[in-house]
Image (spheres, helix red, strand yellow):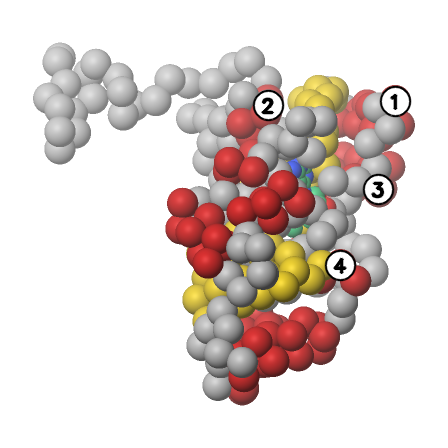
Amino acid sequence: MVHFIGAGPGAVDLITLRGAALLKQAQVVIYAGSLVNPGLLAMCREDCEIYNSAEMTLEQVLSVMEAAEAAGRTTVRLHTGDPCLYGAIREQMDRLDELGIAYDDTPGVSSFCGAAAAARAEYTLPGVSQSVIITRMAGRTPVPDREGIAALAAHGATMVVFLSAGMLEGLQAELLKGAFTEDTPAALVYKATWPEEKVVRCTLGTLAQAGRDNGIRKTALVLVGDFLGSSYERSLLYHPEFTTEYREGRK
Ligand code: SAH
């Protein structure tokens, strides 16, 4: 059996209880070494075989899983944040299906949640934005044309940009082609929930400069949108005059 597990954004105590229990029992662990906190490996059994997937190909990862399965051992595949975002798990799961190896997936706290917590922000503010666009700049991995940053920025919705801290000039220019202006608030969140976490607040007009000034080129998320500003409407749900299934509003 293979267990895919979301390790969370960084802090070791942000893995789920289920993820931690599976990690403690695993006989083989393959972890995404570039971003998973190595502190999590302290939970592993002494006889656990540990592999760092940053140094491996998909084929090597699968052959470790296959050998473990043949030996009747339990494997944990530990991904950063939640495996469903930029995790490259689909290609592993499809291959495991072909090989007839059973697997399951334990979610984790994605870094976009860790970044909101670090910035003490709420992405979905009434009267500001009710949608979150999670995307990335095209790098060596291409992005479909219809999902270019400028096209997505046309909505003016909250945007969280992954995998792009090394391309802030281009990102800033593309975002400015949408509904945002130079004054739209933005933030760079570096290593959210790690001890070295850093939140740099800026505007879209100063985004690239903020990255240069703070030496942030990787392991960061770019947050953009008026949710980082100061105006919004209060929620209806908690308004005294609003009636819900659980509470009678007063007129
Ligand atoms: N599955 C992961 C994302 C993997 S892609 C998740 O759910 O978070 C790797 C990118 O995620 C990095 O380039 C960076 O943009 C972002 N990232 C991962 N951990 C981060 C953290 N602790 N703080 C800020 N950004 C992070």
Q: What element carries label 2?
A: loop
Kindly identify the residue that appears in the image at 57 percent across and 76 percent down. 68
- Lateral position of residue 150 relative to residue 4, left or right: right
The residue beneath circle 3 is 166
Residue named by callout 2? 119
Query: What's the amino acid at mark 4?
Result: Ala
Residue 54 tag number:
4
Q: Could you say where residue 203 lies in the image, as x and y percent from the top left?
A: 74, 22
What separation in Å lies between label 1 and label 2 (alpha carbons)? 19 Å
Separation of disc 4 and disc 1 at Cα?
29 Å
Q: Spatial distance from mark 3 to mark 1, Cα to Cα?
A: 13 Å
The residue under label 3 is which amino acid type? Gly
The residue beneath circle 1 is 213
Foreground pick, 6 / 69:
69
Mark 4 Cα within 10 Å, few/some/many (few <14, many 20+)? few
Could you tell me if residue 65 is visible in this image? yes
Toward the viewer: 178 or 188?
188
- In which image quadrant can residue 164 be found? top right
Amino acid at the residue labelled 1: Asp
Q: Is mark 1 on a helix, strand or loop?
A: helix
